[in-house]
Image: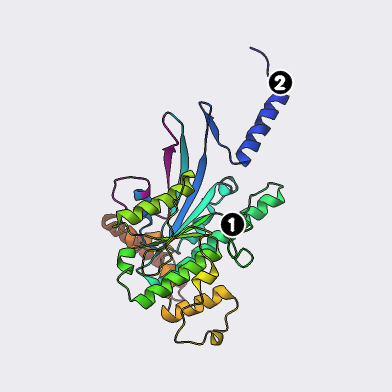
Amino acid sequence: MPKISSDTLWELAAAEVRNRESGGGEEDGGETVTERSVFLMGSKSGGKTSILLRCLDRDEPSKPTLALEYTFGRRARGHSTPKDIAHLWELGGGTSLSDLVQIPITPASFRSLSVILILDLSKPNALWGTMEKLLQAAQAHLEKVSSKAQQTSVHMAACVLPKDYPDRELISPFPVPLLIIGSKYDIFQEFDSDKKKVVSKTLRFVAHYYAASLIFTSIKSESLMSKTKSFFSHLAFGLDRGKTVSCDSSKPLIIPAGCDSFSQIGSPPATDVDITSLHAKNPKDLWKKVYERVFPQESISEQRELKDPAKDPQYSEPPIDAMRAQKDQVTHLYRSHACPSWTSIGWCV
């Protein structure tokens, strides 16, 4: 066997690194296997798992997501070809576990990462708060990862828009491809038409502002789920997302990134208030203030209290919870007797 010099090994390693940095994948029988990552987050009990299972064609019951869960999907590009891989992360708990965004968002995943934000349309009074907190958490960590990479001379490909992208100079693109899904449209469609218009126009503004795609869906509609799957497969496997566009607020919105504009969206639907009296800092803040006039946002204090998943009722397991309560009681009694002098001043609780 001919001896391979160390120089050759280093050259091969360097070539492999360059290939991966340029978006390439592993070789399988002469074909390149592409790997992408998709991070799903959104409203608590908003249907994230159900939508993901349908997009993966998995016929299994959905279960509450425990903190952060991982799965993967594979798809062949043709007959007898290697399957591309999608690494799929799903964040549970709504906004309460937003700190966990740092796990799926890493320097290794940045170049091939997409984010899907799923918002429960049936709960408009929690929609803006959920959207704002999760997008801020994800964006902050994406920018942190990108900044650290630049300091170590590693180039991170930013989201670059075409020169003819609508309102290119006015928007603030999300660092990675973003898809916003409005779930439970079957409930939302029964809302008052004026309220539906406020939600629809607001989400159109937010999606366009971040250069994101937007689609309303329901797991009870095969047609809407088929279109949702196309958007998902575009991010997960690079497939065509379809050409359907629907901007009518009386119908499910289907708006691929780049197919909307501020002129088409129009001004915030504030018929009962003088917009100038809201003293907004910027256009996004104006839309927020108008939206919250119509849908006052619920307090997230309850979510802060449920920071500990063990206290979250959606993860309830009676036998284990009963044992845990008994152990807590024993511990409390032990501590009370172990330090009686501290108990009186509340230091041993």
Q: Residue 61: within the magenta?
A: yes
Q: Position of residue 121 (x, y in %)?
A: 37, 67
- Asked whether, in this view, residue 133 is left or right of residue 329, the answer is right
Q: Position of residue 119 (x, y in %)?
A: 41, 64
Q: Secondary structure at mark 1?
A: loop
How many marks do you count on the picture? 2
Mark 2: few, some, or many residues within 10 Å (few <14, many ≥20)?
few
Image height check: is 163 above or below 83? below
Q: Quadrant of the C terminus?
A: bottom left
Q: Residue 203: within the magenta?
A: no
Q: Which residues are magenta?
A: 55-79
Q: Give the spatial CA distance, label 2 vs label 1.
A: 41 Å
* Kind of residue at badge 1: Pro
Q: Which mark is residue 46?
A: none
Image height check: is 126 above or below 42? below
- Which badge, 2 or 1, comes first in the chain's sequence? 2
Q: Is residue 124 visible?
A: yes
* Kind of residue at badge 2: Ser
Residue at image location 61% in from the left, 55% down from the top: 162
Q: Which mark is residue 5?
A: 2
Query: Is most of the magenta stretch helix, strand or loop?
Result: loop
Return the residue nearer the eye: 344 or 79: 79
Return the residue nearer the eye: 149 or 302: 149
Return the residue nearer the eye: 79 or 119: 79
Q: Secondary structure at mark 2?
A: loop
The residue indicated by pointer 1 is 175
Residue at image location 47% in from the left, 38% down from the top: 84
Image height check: is 176 above or below 172? above
